[in-house]
Amino acid sequence: MEKALGSRYRLGDQLGTGAMGRVFAGSDEQGRAYAFKVLRDELVEDPELVARFLQERSILVGLRHPNLVGVHDLVVEGETVAIVMDLVGGGDLRARLTVEKSLLPAEVARIGAGVAAALAAVHQAGVVHRDVKPENVLMDGTVPRLTDFGISRLATATDLGRRSLLVGTPQYLAPELGKGLEATPASDLYSLGILLYELCCGVTPFAGQSTFAVIRMHESALPGRPAGVPDQLWDVLSWLMAKRPSDRPDSAQQVATILDGLVLELMKEPLVLPLTTPPPPVPLNETGLGTQTVFGTAPPPPRRPVAPTTSPNTMPTGGTMPKRRRRGRIVLALFVVLALLAGGWFAFRPSQTSSAEPGRTVAPATSAAAEVAPVSDSPSVTTTAKPSVMPDVVGKKLADAQDALPGIQVTTVDKIDATAADGTVIEQDPAAGAAIGGTVKLTVAHQAQLVYLDSVHPASGEWNNNVQNTTIAGKNYLHALGRSVDYGTDTQGVEYNVAKGFRRFTATAGIDDNAGDSSLKMQLEIFADGREVFNKPVSYGTPVPVDLDISGVLRLRIQWEAVSGNRSASGNYSFLVLGTAELLGLPGEVPTSTTTTG
């Protein structure tokens, strides 16, 4: 049953509850969906908490980054304080781990790169997250989004919050925090290392111990290495989980760059066997560890090209606020509650975008730069008349198109399109001049990020090594893949783990012009996660275009068999080839490096 909140909003079903308050689904008067976090009375009444809010409001309320959810409004009604935030479809990593138990190494690296990029933005603004864990990473389609930055800083200002954090997150607690030292960006990197460890094998390194035993283990033992974790990924995890903060990476952006470059390298790596209990931890003073100190020594940084980074500034501290009337404290807290909850709440609901193209409410990005918008002393709402007919927004930048649709719920769909400017609207539904219903769908063009298939190592099967370029019907194709075939070729194939990171696969299939059997005909089939998506004959002298939607595909299999040919030509060299085979994806979903291992 819905309940009014202020004059503009209605609260619907409760989505969750926690130490900071309850979260509800709801909508505004135009029918746009939001999530509403209604704060607990104890938090709003605490003068120390209000003072902390005031110190950090100007920084946090203006923080903008594609990996963080937006906050739209705050509401005071009587003694109720609520924050209005984006409602974004997708579950958190805890829910995903519950189902899948562990993730592919390439997926661990891809998600880790996204979380690290989000941390880099938060750190650049001078904020420490303090509570990096699976519950605070939600998946918007394939894009990881970090939530609740600032919530734990809010919590540490109250006894209620401190008790909640101690009970809820010891598995991810950096050693220095267990000693009562101040949290720093390096503390977040340690927690990120624990998170990625858990994504690899399904458990945290010190699971099964009591709360205080886990805290001691963080200080005095190294995590045991789960069998099957690839060396290059383990190097990064070990670096992140170094006991001494100064031995961890220099910045979250450095980690994002390294993990992003590892994704393709790890695509051939299989799942690590999910564990129910972690490997035995290794005491720091045990011989053979390369360290005899209480903090331990970090492994050397992985050898990856890393852009220079600067250390984030520390947030200013200090200052208290005198006690005031209850109403005054609530009003003062409002502005900073908004800031500290800029990480927002990602609610669990089905996506409302088209199934033909995966949709999202915010385009993914790998840049960690945060934009801090000017902040006024009080929130304001600008009301613009809702249009009754659809304006023509094709060709406009997305932000300009949204500005032309005040009061309208806009759903966006990202689409690879090389002919339009990046970030511009290329399709709209409804069409210009038509009546506007409850929602509008805008398709937004993005320039593709390209990876040649010949740079990706197959998970199974192989191509001939001597095919680098090919000629089909007189046209030359670079980045070719090929396999020698003849009349008697049985079903053969090559399979790739594309890790749900690409949207299109394109190539030109054919029989190479230098074939020894010009009568040869092959049947080419392509499967996406076991589902046949392509099945065509390939004959000598006839190029066959391949252009497939592989959005959300984990495994891509290409297979072939002979249909007909000249039996007497068996043994002569003929090649079935894929010319200029390309994997295409969107920035933020695929790695920027094409380096692979052989």
Image (spheres, rainbow, N blue to C red):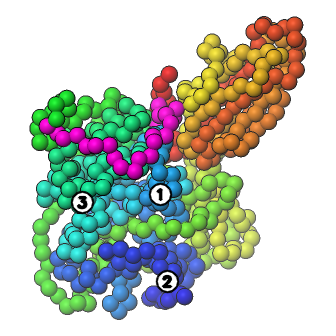
Amino acid marked by disc 1: Thr
Q: In the image, is residue 392 above or below residue 328?
A: above
**Which of pointers 3 and 1 indicates the residue nearer the eye?**
3
Q: Which residue carries the number 2 mark?
A: 11
Mark 2 vs 1, N-terminal side: 2
Q: In the image, is residue 507 above or below residue 125?
A: above
Q: Residues within 10 Å of mark 3 (few under 14, many from 20)?
A: few
Q: In the image, is residue 92 above or below residue 13?
A: above
Mark 3 vs 1, N-terminal side: 1
Instruction: Give x and y (percent) for residue 325.
Output: 20, 91
Q: Which residue carries the number 1 mark?
A: 98
Amino acid marked by disc 2: Leu
Q: Is 100 or 449 nearer to us in this picture?
A: 100
**Which of pointers 3 and 2 indicates the residue nearer the eye?**
3
Does 271 lie within the magenta span? yes
Q: Residues within 10 Å of mark 2 (few under 14, many from 20)?
A: some
Q: Residues within 10 Å of mark 1 (few under 14, many from 20)?
A: few
Q: Is 239 or 35 nearer to us in this picture?
A: 239
- Residue at point 51% right, 41% down? 590
Does 439 lie within the magenta span? no
Q: Which residues are magenta?
A: 263-285
Q: Which residue carries the number 3 mark?
A: 210
Q: Secondary structure at mark 1?
A: helix
Q: Secondary structure at mark 3?
A: loop
Measure how far apart labels 2 and 1 are at the Cα level. Answer: 29 Å
Q: Is 36 or 427 nearer to us in this picture?
A: 36
Mark 3 vs 2, N-terminal side: 2
